[in-house]
């Protein structure tokens, strides 16, 4: 059973908290599980809760399809959006849709 996501939780929260400036935001939808031996023992919502507890501006979107409508009001003319993911074969389609709908 792969427990790496759970064990990396504190490091992830610490490093992201240190990297974010006061005006920065981080948004996450649910972690993509590609199958295999990876255990579903942590949720992106857990990470967002931890980040908020550390004073970061962190937001969780349960359904990735709601991401655009959720984040839209937070986008200003002076911001950058970075979409990231791992092992998700639909991420490129999602990114294209996101930028087309902005």
Image (cartoon, rainbow, N blue to C red):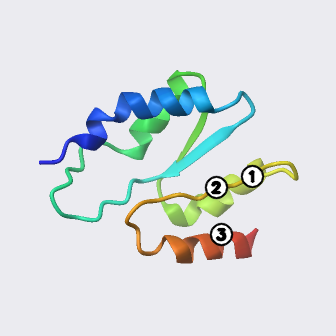
**Vertical position of residue 44 compared to residue 24: above or below:** below
Q: Give SS at disc 1.
A: loop
- State the residue at coordinates (36%, 33%): 9
Which image quadrant: the C terminus? bottom right
For mark 2, does the 10 Å Cα neighbourhood hold few (<14), some (14 to 19), or many (20 or more) residues?
few
- State the residue at coordinates (63%, 75%): 96
Asked if labels 1 and 2 touch by Cβ distance under 8 angstroms, the answer is yes
Given residues 36 and 60, the one toward you in this image is 36
Could you tell whether 79 is left or right of 54 in the image?
A: right
Disc marking residue 41: none
**Vertical position of residue 74 compared to residue 22: above or below:** below
Mark 3 against mark 2, which lies toward the viewer?
2
How many angstroms separate mark 3 from mark 1 (CA)? 13 Å
- State the residue at coordinates (61%, 32%): 19
How many angstroms separate mark 2 from mark 1 (CA)? 7 Å
For mark 3, does the 10 Å Cα neighbourhood hold few (<14), some (14 to 19), or many (20 or more) residues?
some
Disc marking residue 98: 3
Q: Give SS at disc 3.
A: helix
Please provide percent x and percent y for residue 81: 69, 55
Would you identify the image quadrant in which residue 11 lies? top left
Which residue lies most toward the right here? Answer: 77
For mark 1, does the 10 Å Cα neighbourhood hold few (<14), some (14 to 19), or many (20 or more) residues?
few
Q: Residue under circle 1? A: 80
Q: Give SS at disc 2.
A: loop
Please provide percent x and percent y for residue 39: 20, 50
Q: Residue under circle 2? A: 82
**Vertical position of residue 20 compared to residue 90: above or below:** above
């Amino acid at each position: 059973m792969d427990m790496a996501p759970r064990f990396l939780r504190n490091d992830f929260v610490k490093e992201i908290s240190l990297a974010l400036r006061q005006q920065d935001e981080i948004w996450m939808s649910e972690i993509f599980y590609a199958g295999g031996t990876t255990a579903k023992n942590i949720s992106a919502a857990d990470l967002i809760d931890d980040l908020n507890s550390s004073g970061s501006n962190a937001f969780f979107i349960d359904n990735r399809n709601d991401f655009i409508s959720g984040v839209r009001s937070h986008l200003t003319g002076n911001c950058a959006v970075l979409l990231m993911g791992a092992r998700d074969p639909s991420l490129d389609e999602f990114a294209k849709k996101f930028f087309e709908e902005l």
